[in-house]
Image (cartoon, helix red, strand yellow):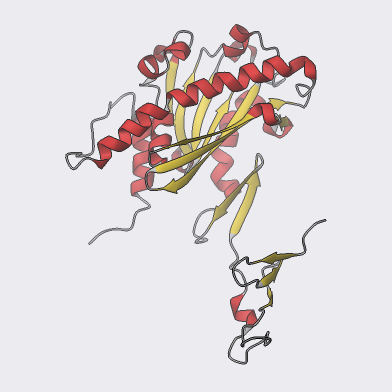
Amino acid sequence: MTRKVIRCPYHSWTYGLDGALHSTPHIGGHGQHQCADFDNDEHSLRVVRSATWMGMVFVNLDGSGPEFSTHIAGLEQRWSSFTGVGGLNNVEAVGEDGSLELEFHANWKLAIENYCESYHLPWVHPGLNSYSHIDDHYNIVGGEWGAGQGTYKFTFSERAGIEWPVFDQWPKDKSAQAEYVALFPNVLLGLHIDHFYSVIVQPLAHNRTRELLQIYCVGDSVADDKHARARREMLNGWRAVFEEDIRPVEEMQRGRDSTAFDGGAFSPVLDTATHHFHRWVAARYPQVA
């Protein structure tokens, strides 16, 4: 049954789905559910701008950001050259075989920073680097919406014997190309000819983060038993990659906790997307007098 109200578990105040405050049990004392000095209309839930995209809910708490359709437009336009206009609307979330949750002891921004660059590939991801080499990668700097990296040689599905439906408008001469974008502030996305994934990066504390990964396929034809092995292979492949990132990201956090940390050193070539994220974050911190 669909709930018609939102109930606070602390004092059991209830709100309508429109945010209006409906009831305030005992607010005026035991058995007194109204109070002359309290106007329910002045204490409705705050309206927050929100939008949904690819099964995720995006919110803008202070209301000062652009419309989400404007924020995402640059990425959608970029990826339409692979999927066709509106092509991502044709993907379906893979069920339990297509999701995982990871936690690590580091600030969420370090996970974004790590995702933006391929510089660490040979040493952190030797298996991935064996067929999608650092030299095959390129930087993506996307304005206000995000940054990341791409590769011209992603052949995991072929190597793992996975045969999934593909985007029918994907250019044949780019079948091995894939792109990995951090959609600012805290969503990681990966686009391939036969699948797509999203990772919601949840800050749990200043030095603790959770990642929620969801894999999507083109259409819904991989949900049957025939594709069970392929679903496991795909999920385990990405699990291995994201788990390999945990140790270096946690070590980055320990380095930043040091009193000797002075900002670090970055490659002026391979860290351009990372620098873009740094500038994006810095621009949103209040100016300190």
Q: Quadrant of the N terminus?
A: bottom right
Residue at horizontal 77 percent and vertical 24 percent from the top: 223
Check the image and name the residue furthest to the left. Answer: 260
Check the image and name the residue furthest to the front. Answer: 30
Q: Looking at the image, is 10 positioned above or below residue 31?
A: above
Residue at horizontal 51 percent and vertical 12 percent from the top: 153
Q: Quadrant of the C terminus?
A: bottom left
In the displayed structure image, the side of residue 147 where residue 282 appears, left or right: left
Residue at horizontal 38 percent and vertical 27 percent from the top: 247
Quarter of the image where one finds residue 158: top right
Check the image and name the residue furthest to the right. Answer: 1
Q: Is residue 84 visible?
A: no
Q: Could you tell me residue 65's position as x and y percent?
A: 50, 55
Q: How many marks?
A: 0
Q: Could you tell me residue 258's position as x and y percent?
A: 22, 40
Q: Is residue 150 visible?
A: yes
Q: Nearer the viewer, residue 192 or 24?
A: 24
Quarter of the image where one finds residue 196: top right
Q: Nearer the viewer, residue 121 or 236?
A: 236
Q: Looking at the image, is 279 positioned above or below residue 150?
A: below
Q: Looking at the image, is 286 positioned above or below residue 260?
A: below
Q: Looking at the image, is 260 positioned above or below residue 96?
A: below
Q: Could you tell me residue 20's position as x and y percent?
A: 68, 73
Q: Nearer the viewer, residue 13 or 200?
A: 13
Q: Could you tell me residue 210's position as x and y percent?
A: 49, 40
In the displayed structure image, the side of residue 289 where residue 269 appears, left or right: right
Residue at horizontal 64 percent and vertical 12 percent from the top: 172
Quarter of the image where one finds residue 156: top right
